[in-house]
Image (tube, helix red, strand yellow):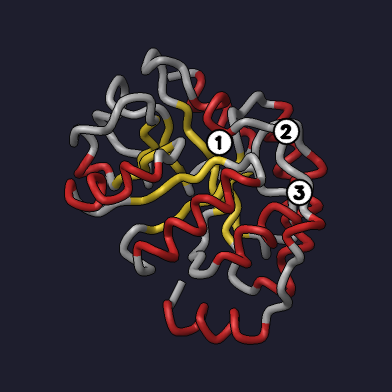
Amino acid sequence: MDLERRRKQNLTSPRQDAREVTPSIRSFALAIDRQRQGLERIPVLQASRRDLIEVCTALDEAEVAAVAISIDEPQAELGRMQEAARSISVPLLRTDLLLEEFQIYESRAAGADAVLLRAGAVPFEILARMAQAAKGTHMAACIACASAAEIDQVAPLQPAVIALPPSLIGLKIPPRMLVLALEYGEGLHGRADAALDETLDSADAFRRTLET
């Protein structure tokens, strides 16, 4: 997602009233926490795909730990994410670019149980407000970091999850924080709790991972 394009989208996006947002009751952190005894692979789906609801339902029936959804056109696709969230029993993580606090509330209103925030995308003060908004709605704030310095910077926010590219898995993470790899790769088992995986675009694809 292009930064300037998302900023322009935000200018015309309606603002969700935080007072009307119902807190999440599905814990993303609990869903991926297996004490590093296994690696949860989380399918990443585009909200625009026509069979989104059917695929989400099938993945839920295949006992996936969680589902991640990326939105390209918020005004057109937030409703699709909401439908998907209602169709599943597992937590839903929103993974597209979030730049403002109101997007946290719109995410929760559309059924998200967790949001992916990017430490390098916004000033720290805004990141802190976004993380607090997520906590206030009982969503997991998963903060993506691109360096050890960013991990140290966001540590005081006490996010439920630190998200890292596979090349940085192994960096020291503060206690009681889970690790989410931003993409699946070799060597993650025992070093991360979960990994986003865009190749798992169907229940059959997910089931095949259980056979290996």
Local packing at callout 3 (Cα closer than 10 Å; few below 14, some 14-19, many 20+) is many
Query: Quick one: 134 or 33, which is closer to the camera?
Result: 134
Local packing at callout 1 (Cα closer than 10 Å; few below 14, some 14-19, many 20+) is few
Residue at figure coordinates x 74%, y 60% from the top left:
50
Along the horizontal axis of the image, is 96 left or right of 102?
left
C-alpha separation, residue under disc 1 versus residue under disc 3: 19 Å
Name the amino acid, label 3.
Ala
Point out the tag, 1 or 3, that comes first from the N-terminus: 3
Q: Is residue 51 visible?
A: no
Name the amino acid, label 2.
Ile
Q: Which residue is mark 3?
A: 84
Report x, y in % for residue 81: 72, 56
Point out the tag, 3 or 2, that comes first from the N-terminus: 2
Relative to 159, residue 190 above or below: above
Report x, y in % for residue 18: 73, 60
Q: Quadrant of the C terminus?
A: top left
Local packing at callout 2 (Cα closer than 10 Å; few below 14, some 14-19, many 20+) is few
Q: Which residue is mark 2?
A: 25
Residue at figure coordinates x 58%, y 49% from the top left:
134
Element marked by disc 2: loop
Along the horizontal axis of the image, is 57 left or right of 100?
right
Report x, y in % for residue 112: 67, 48
Element marked by disc 1: helix
Point out the tag, 1 or 2, that comes first from the N-terminus: 2
Q: Quadrant of residue 146?
A: bottom left
Element marked by disc 3: helix
Report x, y in % for residue 29: 52, 30
Relative to 202, residue 10 above or below: below
Q: Which residue is mark 1?
A: 205
